[in-house]
Image (cartoon, rainbow, N blue to C red):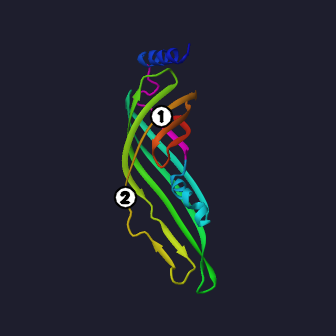
Amino acid sequence: MSSFPLKTLFFAALCLAGHYSFNKGDWFVSAGAGFPNQNGLLLRPVRKELNFEYKGSGPFHFKAEYAILDNLGVGISYNRVAFEASWKVNNPDLAKAFDYRLTYASNSLIIRLNGHYPAAPGLDIYGGFGVGLKTGRPKLVSDDPAKKSWTFPFTFPLGAEATAGARIRLADPLYIYVEAGLAKSFVQGGLSLRI
């Protein structure tokens, strides 16, 4: 017999026990990294075709959250991701290859609302969403005299994220956190500190 039903019942019993590891008045600060760099995912299908080099950094996630209730927190989230792609384009009329470089960096500052759920001691399960501001504008630069540089003329300045995750206590006040959802990455994790 599979142990899945027993594990599910055990987990449900822990949740119904009503213990919150997130208590009114708590502050948590977190720092982590995410996977994947979604810009890299978008470029991956054409990477071999165009024969370009790609470098990316992030996504990096920094958060602070305050417990206004045992089961409700408000916070702020700062996220950053960047990439650079470079390639050469042959110009047969000039018998020369020109360099092209596409760069992009995006920062977002999001106000979040998180709901927290009862769980086992040392475990904080939560889900939340937020909206805020974001920056970022792709820029294309080339040494081709006919196409010096180009910056995307407009970016939408509104950012949003929605994630679900958990904090797992290592030794109070230190926790690790893991989240899945949409926040410049699909999966993220890092360290949290209760202050």
Which disc is residue 116 wearing? Answer: none
Which three-letter amino acid code belongs to the residue tagged 1?
A: Gly
Counting from the top left corner in percent of width and height, residue 164 is at: 44, 36
- Rendering quarter of residue 27: top left
Q: Earlier in the sequence, mark 2 or mark 1?
A: 2
Counting from the top left corner in percent of width and height, residue 155 is at: 39, 63
Specify whether 149 is left or right of 157. right
Q: Tag 2, which secondary structure?
A: loop
Q: Please report the residue visible at 36 percent of the width from the left and 60 percent of the height from the top.
A: 156
- Is 10 located above or below residue 103 in the figure? above
- Is 192 located above or below residue 142 in the figure? above
Counting from the top left corner in percent of width and height, residue 64 is at: 46, 41
User: Is residue 163 on the magenta stretch?
Assistant: no
Q: Please report the residue visible at 63 percent of the width from the left and 85 percent of the height from the top.
A: 95
Residue that lies at the very extreme toward the bottom in this rendered image: 94
* CA distance separating discs 2 and 1: 26 Å
- Is 188 located above or below residue 136 in the figure? above
Camera-nearest residue between 86 and 189: 86
- Residue under pointer 1: 165
Q: Please report the residue visible at 52 percent of the width from the left and 24 percent of the height from the top.
A: 122
- Residue under pointer 2: 157
The answer to whether the residues at label 2 and label 1 have Cβ atoms under 8 Å apart is: no
Indicate the quadrant containing the N terminus: top left, top right, bottom left or bottom right: top right
Specify whether 173 is left or right of 76. right
User: Is residue 30 on the magenta stretch?
Assistant: yes
Crowdedness of circle 1 by 10 Å Cα count: few (<14), some, many (20+)? some
Q: How many badges with numbers are in the image? A: 2
Residues in magenta, as a range: 19-35
